[in-house]
Image: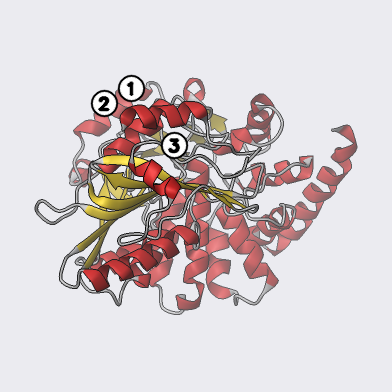
Amino acid sequence: MAFQLPSVAILLVTAQVVRIFGRGSEARVYAWALPKQDFVRDYAEPETLSEKFAVAKLFHFPVDPLIRDLVRLPPSDVRYRATVRALSMNADLTSLAKIRPLWNTPGMEMKRRDISTIRMGIQYQEKLLFAKTDGLRDTPNARTWWDRGIETVNRIVARVKAYRLEHPSEPIYIFDGAISSGVMTLQLARRLADVPDVHITGFDISLNYTIVDGLTPDYRLVFDSFGRLVQAVPTDSRGRFWTRWTLALYLPESQAFNEAMLMTIGGILIGDDRCPLPSIKEIESTFQTLSSRSSAAGIQVTSIDFVDPEVRAFADEHPDRLSLVQADVFNPPHPPGIGSRYLEGRLMGLFSRDKERYFSFGQIKRGIDALAGTMLDGGHLQVGIDQTRHHKELLLDEYRIIAGVPTLVHTTYKPDIHVTDTDSGPGANSTASGAAASAGAPPAPSAPVERRAISPAFNRLFQRAA
């Protein structure tokens, strides 16, 4: 660790020297010190001391000078790319209230995808699901990006188009669960734009958060969709930024070391016991009594959408094609049509059986049963993850709903693709293993897969369910 101190000193001195050109220049120095890979899309992590130092500095860096640079710099400028990177490393949720309006700003049309990238970076660091998970990880987070899990979208599109040829007048309903910002839901909707009478329901347990000004004299407060206080942002330079939790604690090295870095280098307070406010419970109780018209009492309440502006605009313009609903995967929404059911379903990340799974196999089974309860017989449900932190691969389980029971018919592994069975959708010819799956027993792999073998315990759960 000590041998890395000179690189940190060089980084700090360089940042202070270029600061004479503006705070934006200082932030870009820190952004250039980060790993080249994207933190959200590539599961990159800072490993060296200088990289972690840069993360701590950017965690609550003032966004106003960076936003000005984002507007004025051309996308081809290397400073522009560093500005995007610096903003995407910010963890202050109130900054989204300043960044979101840029999407509709004249002259920013060519920069909209970068605005989306920035928003997804901020949400990834701070939008966590505070739930009683019982798996190997306890912090489900908001992680998505354009083209994530595109193979699942390709499968849905192919099957829906084939189904439409066989059923030309029947409405088709699809769901996409745990959508985060919803960008992949939008890609699915656009891919099916030429198929008539198709409606997609995208849902997530949290689609917005709330900023409250005036509830305390020295802080802007941020509450999640469940009314939990998650951040306190000081209104002047004397206060310190407080966040209840952050994924930055899980960077390489120990959690205590990363927390110390954020507190000493970034000036951040983390955790319930370090909240600068007298009582979290009292503040949350007061928040529950507020209304959206509290500004008359000197309190301003602002709701901020977690959904990407491009996704929200499409849903508003095409309500017959896409609806966005706040709902839990364990209690999923039904399609908008009376008595209707979904033909296709997709859930990325949350119910993955990966080594870093959030839920136990029992909870995963309960959730999949709930999702299957909203689907047509013969419908398909895709559940999995497109890549993992340690192995760049895909682990995707596909279920077919048979007599109301979700039956595992297909598991894909990449890059060494291994498929236990193939099922091309309604009207497909059954294979021997597919017939076995229809009878209630998940198909056995045709060849062993050492790194990601299907768990016998998981298979037994589905055998009993059938």
- Residue ID at (23%, 32%): 288
Residue type of the residue flagged with mark 3:
Gln
| CA neighbours of label 2 inside 10 A, class few (<14), some (14 to 19), many (20+) | few
Quarter of the image that includes the C terminus: top left
Q: Is residue 275 above or below residue 127?
A: above
Image location (x, y in percent) of residue 82 = 66, 63
Q: Which residue is mark 1?
A: 281
Residue type of the residue flagged with mark 2:
Ser
The answer to which of marks 2 and 3 sits earlier in the sequence is 3
| CA neighbours of label 1 inside 10 A, class few (<14), some (14 to 19), many (20+) | few
- Residue ID at (43%, 27%): 460
Q: Which residue is mark 3?
A: 231
- Whether residues under marks 1 and 2 lie with C-beta atoms below 8 angstroms apart, the answer is yes
- Relative placement, left or right, of 317 versus 384 is left
Q: Which residue is mark 2?
A: 285
The answer to which of marks 3 and 1 sits earlier in the sequence is 3
Image location (x, y in percent) of residue 79 = 67, 68
- Residue ID at (47%, 75%): 108
- Residue ID at (70%, 47%): 54
Residue type of the residue flagged with mark 1:
Lys
Image location (x, y in percent) of residue 70 = 55, 68
Indicate the secondary structure of the residue bearing disc 1: helix
